[in-house]
Image: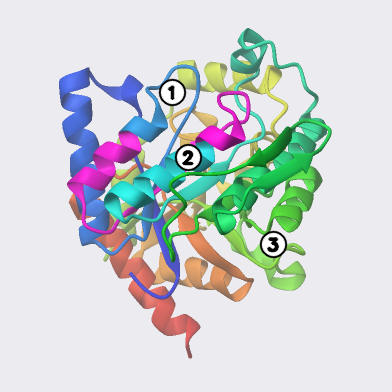
Amino acid sequence: MSSIEVFSTCPQSTSADIERYIQNVIDVARWSEEQGCKGILVYADNSLVDPWLVSQTIIGATQALCPLVAVQPIYMHPYTVANMVSSLGYLYGRRIYLNMVAGGFKNDLAALNDLTPHDRRYDRLIEYTLVIKSLLADGSPVSYKGEFYEVDKLKLTPPLPRGLFPGIFVSGSSDAGLAAAEAIGATAVKYPEPPEEYETKGTDRVSNSGVRVGIIAREDSNEAWRIAHERFPEDRKGQVTHQLAMKVSDSVWHKQLSEMPDKTESPDTPYWLVPFKNYKTFCPYLVGSYDQVAREVKRYIAAGYETFILDIPPSEEELRHIGTVFKLASVEAQR
């Protein structure tokens, strides 16, 4: 799409029966690659199939698309993560990206007996990621003794092929998340506020930053909004579910978006929170004409956000429309 890195998002296994789900994953992966996406985010939580197996399906269906795998420390040892990255690199010659997840749904964590407080989960995530990075670095034995993890002369075999060291992302919506991103050299990903909020303050202190945002754009703004309201209608049941989720979540970004004023939910601005507040998706949207949305994207780029993670695309056509936005934004950003 441009020099800016764009990732799409893989469908969730709860969205369809298994036969249709596998084909949907393959379709979305191929659309994403054909429309120039660098990679594709693969979710992980207690209700979903294993993200590594989904990622292998994606690799098998595409030529170069990079899975961005959600990795939660409570699910597996850091050696297992490093071994998966190395194994996929060895077998397929494909680079993997890691989305390091400190939290999750509170009930999921409780079911796994993980009662670690929010900020301490990021302390654990730092150690976890440092062990993974050390194992993947050059094939040398790794010894590490921290508060949460300890390994002694642990060696990864086969070593990761050259040039396939993973890109690493982490949520950067809280101070603890930003500190973790800085400590592990990760791209800090935000669920962003409207872009004007960043024009004076810029990005946070980390060197690499990105945003998670959905996009609906057409040549005509009215047509884009018609499609947006058709796809994400107001839903009282969804609003109640969102409110209940807020009560059991300690997510900083979830709280930040939920407390944003309703004035952002207007055709006067491309920034739109109705899908999020109606529990239809987990990110803000930008809606409008190609030019309008491209201007908003350009403002994020100007503020220092160089990675964009999109919502799950409903069709290849939608990705083509999004591609038009990024082409326009990239041209504008280079002027």
Residue in the image at 29% along x and 47% along y: 91
Residue 59 or residue 296, whichever sits in front: 59
Please state the extent of the stretch shown in magenta in the rendering.
54-80
The image quadrant of residue 74 is top right
Q: Amino acid at mark 3?
A: Glu
The residue identified by callout 3 is: 197
- Mark 2 residue element: helix
- Mark 1 residue element: loop
- Mark 3 residue element: helix
Question: Is any part of residue 192 visible from this angle?
Answer: no
How many angstroms separate mark 2 from mark 1 (CA)?
A: 43 Å
In the drawing, what numbered circle is on residue 83? 2
Magenta-colored stretch includes residue 50: no
Q: Amino acid at mark 2?
A: Asn
Q: For mark 1, does the 10 Å Cα neighbourhood hold few (<14), some (14 to 19), or many (20 or more) residues?
A: some
Instruction: Give how far across and how far down residue 174 sits, in percent.
Output: 75, 44
Instruction: Give how far across and how far down residue 224 sits, in percent.
Output: 31, 54
In the drawing, what numbered circle is on residue 235? 1
CB under 8 Å between discs 2 and 1: no
Residue 234 or residue 332, whichever sits in front: 332
